[in-house]
Structure formats: structure tokens, C-alpha cells
Amino acid sequence: MSAAKPQFKRFNPMPPAPTVNVYRVRLGGVVEGQQTMNTFYYDDAMPVGSATTATLTELFNAFTGAGGVTTAYDAAVSSDWTFSNLTIDCPTSPTLAASVVSPLVAGTGPAGHEPNQVAVTLAKTTAWKGQHGRGRISLPAVPTVWVSQTLLINTVAIGALVTKMKQALVGASHSFTPGLLSRATPPGTTLGYMPLTNVVIRTVLGSCRRRKPGVGK
């Protein structure tokens, strides 16, 4: 609802409730003593309630192993950033204990980064229309040599990360498909889930705040 014009109420329908196990991967880091966090979602195409600790471990191995997401993520951020923790849980099985590791690995991109409020926005989309069908992550520690004024001019490493984000991760016995999990507004226990259809690099640099250069007043 708009504060300026309260007669206009925005209606955002929820995606369908998940019928498969949905996993949340939270990748944490540190730069200049400040914490960063990005969240990724996957499903395993198995019925809700069948997730196990072994499945969490399998997803961890696929996410962090050769050809996984973390290697591409490290290359997409400055070496000033440190990969400090990784947490995997299952929102569709909230009683299942989360898997937590602390790798303490530095980024592998060029040293020297933009101010900490600056980020590269990676926009995630699904086939579901409306706000509940799209999301984003804000990639921290943007290497300064990849930037000109407010534009990202070198997208090679970040493009490789985007490719990994759109791909299914193959484990020993499961394939994990990237998706987007939504929660009802106001926050509650109602969940909606859709597979990802695309991830797009926004070349205008953003921040963890909602408003970007050229948007709004």
C-alpha cells in the first residue's frame, strides 16, 4: 500500500507452495571487518519432508567442489574479501539441523575494491510474474579495476558466476536445480517456490540499498 496514495494497494500473488525439498545456501564473507551475505536456493526434485543430513552434505560438496559455485564466486570478488562461512539448511524441513562450515578462503579477483556500500546486482528471474517471482543478490568487494565511474566494464568473471548460478549442481545421488523461494507478506510460514529462468548482471553499480543511480528522486 502506498503511503502517499493509500487507496492503491499492491497485490503480489505467491508462487505455488513447494512440493519438493528446497535448500537455502547462505554464503558469508568479510571485507574490512564488515560481514557480507548472499543466499542461493536449490531443490532436489524429491518430495517435501524427505531431506536428510546426507542430502545437505551432498549439496555442500556440489556447491563447493570442482565446477561448483564457490570457485566462480571467489573469482568474481576482490582478494580483499574472505569467504568466512557457508550455511546450508532446508526451509521445507525446518527441524533438520543446518550444515555450517567456516572455510576462511580469500577471494581470487584483483586486489583493491570499491567502497563497501557498492555492489554488483545480479537479478534473478523465474516464470512467475510479480515481485514474488524475482530476486537478486548484491555481489560485494567489486574490484576497482573492473569499474569506470558507476559502470561495471569487465564482466568476464562475474559472467562466469552467473553461468554457474543458472546451472543445476550434480551430486552423488541428486541433482540440485536453482530456484527462488518466497515468503508471504507479512512474513509468515507460507512459502512459494519457482525454478530460476535467468540471472542478469546489472552493469550499473548498485548497493545493498534498494535505490540505484537514476532510479527514484
Image (cartoon, rainbow, N blue to C red):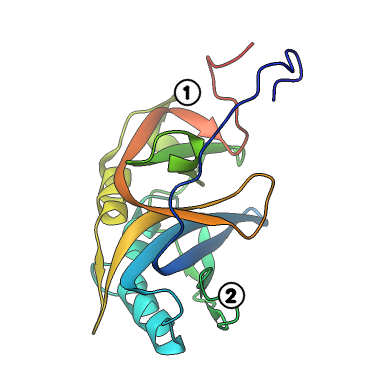
For residue 16, side relative to residue 177 (left or right): right
Q: Can you say whether 200 is above or below 20 in the image? A: above
Determine the residue positioned at 70% across, 20% down: 2
Residue 126, located in which quarter of the rendered image?
Answer: top left
Viewer-nearest residue: 121 or 175: 175
Q: Is residue 172 left or right of residue 95?
A: left
- Hey, what amino acid is under mark 2? Pro
Q: State which quarter of the image contains the C terminus.
A: top right
* Residue 94 numbered mark, or none: 2
The residue located at (69%, 25%) in the rendering is 1
Residue 125 lies, with reference to residue 28, above or below; the image says above
Residue 207: image location, x then y, percent: 57, 35
As measured in the structure, the alpha-carbon distance from the residue carrying label 1 to the one carrying label 2 is: 41 Å
- Helix, strand or loop for disc 2: loop
Q: Is residue 192 left or right of residue 75?
A: right
Q: Residues within 10 Å of mark 1 (few under 14, many from 20)?
A: few
Question: Along the polypeptide, which appears first: circle 1 or circle 2?
Answer: 2
29 relative to 173, above or below: above
Picture quadrant where residue 188 is located: bottom right
Residue corresponding to mark 1: 150
Camera-side residue of 109 and 212 = 212
